[in-house]
Amino acid sequence: MAEHPGPFPSVRIVGIGATEFSTASGRSELRLAVEACRAALDDAGLAPSAVDGMATFAADSNPEIEVARALGASPLRFFARTQYGGGDYCGTVRLGAMAVELRLADVVVCYRAFNERSGGRYGQGMGGTPPLASADLAQYSWSIPHGLVNAAGWMALFGRRYMHEYGATSEDFGRVTVAARRFAADNPKARFFGRPITLADHQASRWIVEPLHLLDCCLETDGAVAVVMARADRAADCRQRPVAIRAAAQGAAANQHLMANYYAADPMAFEELDVAAAELWRQCGLGPTDVQAAIVYDHFTPMVLAQLEGYGFCGRGEGKDFVADGHIGPGGRLPVNPHGGQLGEAYLHGMNGVNEAVRQVRGHAVNQIDGIEHVLLTAPPGVPTSSMVLGPA
Amino acid sequence: MGKGGQWAGAPTTEGLGMGEGRRPRPAITPDTGPWWDGLAAGRVLVQRCRECDHPQHPPEPACLACGSLDLGWADASGRGEIYSFVVCHEPPVPGLDPPYVVAVATLEEGTRLIANVVGSAPDDVRVGAAVTIDVVQADDTLFLPAFRLVDRPGGDGQSGSR
């Protein structure tokens, strides 16, 4: 398949920004959002008044108008959200890119801000809220009364089945974290800066939901991340080297459920990944051999293996071997999450990975990978998923 | 298709890890209500299409096989096999006493169901193990399905089938 420009030929990522990543920000989620958006606009060399579009996650507590007002944005011509949390983080960026490409807005900021550590922690599980009779809440009813209340539990069920089908072990999962922590150790912004781990550390960490140890789980974090997009002509006047979105895909399976996605004939086939991967490669005419680094959604280690398989870096069930052979770490064939990922830098619904992908394409990442032409970004299966390919403009 | 009355006797609390407080409550809709009502009556139901007989779980507003809106209910056979399972240690969950086992089982009907494995030590649970399915009373108003291993070390191999 020949390489081609994809659906977003006019769009450029011109700015990235973030707050610090911490366990207790001491500030409102709204203020975090504003700080990250300002940082991203500063990075781009754009004034807040240039912004006339905003996109975020449905899960974000900060309405677009609240952020826009405090930011000093222009009257908004575009505002929209995507569902499904981190599964659709690339979809959120894609939503902004669509608005720019279609000239629905000139400058769009995408943001995600939360006090996920000091405030409401996903890891503490669902069940505190009174039930309402709507389908979006009813979907959790099949698991939470049994004490399967959070993503660690939902993903651990996939992890156990992965072990059963492919002979993987806890050590196979642990190698994902060891690689992430090695990268994070070099990243001053990472929560785990200067703190690499060994496989023995992983094995010795306490159980959260067997077969997942504590060190199979991402880092609940306070912080915010933002990304600014504009059209190519405007990007030429911006401060940073512009980055192109070569492709951006979403995917949901025909029989998709949220998180507790165990009802397809073969749940481990992860049809949602196949849908998104096929769409992604179709858009740009590229394939797994055309990317030099990847941002892989690492909320829980087994799901990293599934994404490596789903996007064609190895066969199904071979993700554990790909990782054991050292391909995802420093100097590997496909360095994954050179910022340390959500296991080592911060868990922010994947959006800090978008910042890292932009840095890699620009060429000024802390752990800069040589010879970057394209960076792949992927989101996990088990939820509606998304992916993206970034490259130089 | 199963017949009513397979769940003779009141739901039990045997083998349940009963921690402090009440478990997270299900959110019940008009589409799913009959399934929860079935549990309260001691029955594990599987939604069945009245047009094409397709079984499905979780309950849907329409048949996933033929699209019919004419859906009914049948008793599950009460037998299945563990597809996957986890042992939960954290976070604390009201009404549960860790470590406890949550499994996904494939039922004889071909549908899948999430429930606790009760009456066995976590270390005895295996993917592929045969289970029977009971109704248990988790607290004052909450009835849930629960799995029991057919072959339990030190067990009689029959427990939970009635």
Image (cartoon, helix red, strand yellow):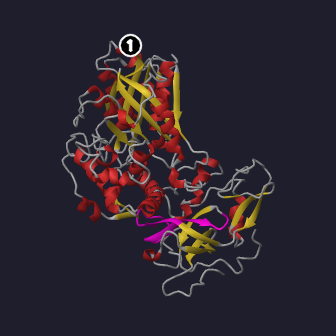
* A67 falls in the magenta region: no
In percent of width and height, residue A180 lies at 28, 48
Which quadrant of the rendered structure holds the C terminus of chain A? top left
As helix, strand or loop, the secondary structure at mark 1 comes to: helix
Residue at 57% from the left image edge and 70% from the top image edge? B81
Mark 1, other Cα within 10 Å: few <14 / some 14–19 / many ≥20: some
* Residue A165 placement, left or right of A197: right
Rendered view: B40 above or below A40: below
Which of these two is toward me, B53 or A56? Answer: B53
Q: Dividing the picture into quarters, in which one does residue A68 lie? A: top left
Q: Dividing the picture into quarters, in which one does residue B54 lie? A: bottom right
First to last magenta residue range? B83-109
Rendered view: A393 above or below A27: above
In percent of width and height, residue A330 lies at 23, 43
* B88 falls in the magenta region: yes
Q: The residue marked by circle 1 belongs to what chain?
A: A
Rendered view: B25 above or below A286: below
* Residue A126 placement, left or right of A287: right
In percent of width and height, residue A19 lies at 31, 35
Residue A342 visible within the image = yes
In percent of width and height, residue A73 lies at 43, 20
Q: How many marks?
A: 1
Please identify the residue farthest to the front as the structure is shown. A1
Residue at 24% from the left image edge and 62% from the top image edge? A200
Residue underneath mark 1? A234
Q: Dividing the picture into quarters, in which one does residue A110 lie? A: top left
Which of these two is toward me, A10 or B138? Answer: A10
* Residue A117 placement, left or right of A136: left
Q: Looking at the picture, which amino acid does disc 1 mark?
A: Arg
Which of these two is toward me, A227 or B123? Answer: B123
* Residue B153 placement, left or right of A325: right
Rendered view: A4 above or below A32: above
